Image (cartoon, rainbow, N blue to C red):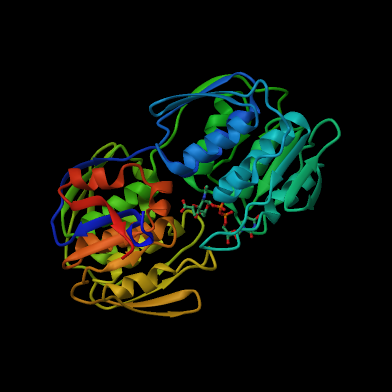
Amino acid sequence: MSINSISEPALEIIGRNPLKGEVKISGAKNSALAIMAGTLLCADDCRLNNVPCLADINTMGLVLASLGVKIHKNGSTWEFNSKDLKAVKAPYDLVSQLRASFFVIGPILTRLGFAQVPLPGGCAIGSRPVDLHVRGLQAMGATVIIEHGVVNASVNKRLKGAKIFLDYPSVGATETIMMAATLAQGQTIIENAAREPEIVDLANFCNSMGAKITGAGTDSIVIEGVNRLHTTDYDIIPDRIEAGTFLVAGAITKSEILVTSLNYDHLTPIIAKLAEIGCQVVREDEITLRTIPGELKASDIETLPHPGFPTDMQAQFMALLTISEGNSLVTETVFENRLRHVAELKRMGANIKVKGNSALVSGVPILSGAPVMATDLRASAALVLAGLAADGKTIVQGLQHLDRGYENLEQKFQKLGAKIKRIYHSNK
Ligand code: EPZ
């Protein structure tokens, strides 16, 4: 095969095609990943339902299997049994691909007294340190030695409950400490805890196995340690970021679409911002929203920990703001390098100026289709949204990012009438 015929998957989008119909939202990636780690807390069978079919989920499955977990998958239902959990090192090549693999450290340590997990590297959006995870485990009595890129954590007998204040309401650190505390001796209190819906889902999952967690969803979570946890059959919550992405798709293509199988309460900052920009979102029923498009107006966005505006929706909203009349200031406060979609949006005719962690977006009447390269998961979603609204053809490359976090994205958009298909793009 000649070098210039090597092809890689890309999405070809013909823009300015109004959408119509209904799209069903899948299970939440960021909830499923943490809860899959949480299945290590109990030696009995654990069943998870509504697990999305994603590259990241499969990678987490491989990490768990490498630790001796027996896994049976049947569609969106996964069954786990970690009776034979081994305190072996999780493979670096998997942890480096999926930093959420690091979440296994709390469950393994609290279950076996010893855990060895490679330090997850940084990624496109930031350095992604784990110091808050480590400090939380140390506060509970763990000895942690980091050497040769591996976090070695151990404890004589059992972790002890502690009062832990998080310098930053880190989602992952809150999850690591909460899971470790379920089997610790005594009470753990996490102050300045993250409040994301995925934290609540993880707490509900652990409580369904017999854990004693209260306060999840507030900034103070209390965990009373128990001696063991038992089997459970648990449904993962819907993915609020996928739901938000489709709501923005309705707004950016000025289409009226139905987005269903979602949890309305998880979407308040997204719905509020859409209304401010000019796209009303009305509730059809308990689990369904309808977009009512309108003229798009500029609006400022600052990403914050929940219940503030979610960083995972920043790129998608920036795509919307590129064709919203007026100037919008978008400030990314959660991650240090999450504006990489700006350069690609500018290739499509967007008018954006970046200064530090802020981008000034001046609305233009229309974008123009172009070949663009995705740099990270949510940036790839933003480029798809921009392509749906742009004049002409857009080719989005770098689909390995998209496939990490969106289940059958192009099929879902095709069902809404979008002209989008997966092609094998030669690098010529
Ligand atoms: C989770 O990442 C999500 N991933 C991210 O989603 C999401 O963007 C993020 O939470 C914020 O909501 C999963 O749940 C698998 P953090 P996490 O710890 O846990 C700093 C997506 O697109 N920090 O809340 O890594 C960190 O550097 C992904 O689906 C420390 O300094 O996020 C960052 O600046 C992207 N020390 C900030 O906190 C630590 O020990 C927020 O990180 C941990 C974090």
Rendered view: 359 above or below 311: below
* Figure quadrant of the C terminus: bottom left
For residue 274, say whether it is visible: no
Q: Nearer the viewer, residue 426 or 213?
A: 426
Q: Residue at x 36, y 52 (%)?
A: 268
Q: Give coordinates of residue 89: x percent, y percent.
A: 71, 39
Q: Quadrant of ligand 1?
A: bottom right
Q: Give coordinates of residue 310: x percent, y percent.
A: 44, 57
Q: Residue at x 78, y 42 (%)?
A: 153
Q: Quadrant of residue 176?
A: top right
Q: Residue lying furthest right in this view?
A: 156
Q: Give coordinates of residue 262: x percent, y percent.
A: 33, 40
Q: How many marks?
A: 0
Rendered view: 73 above or below 172: above
Q: Quadrant of residue 184?
A: top right
For residue 265, say whether it is visible: yes
Q: Quadrant of residue 189?
A: top right
Q: Nearer the viewer, residue 364 or 265?
A: 364
Q: Residue at x 79, y 37 (%)?
A: 160
**Left or right of 291, for residue 205:** right
Q: Give coordinates of residue 216: x percent, y percent.
A: 56, 41
Rendered view: 39 above or below 339: above
**Left or right of 98, for residue 84:** right
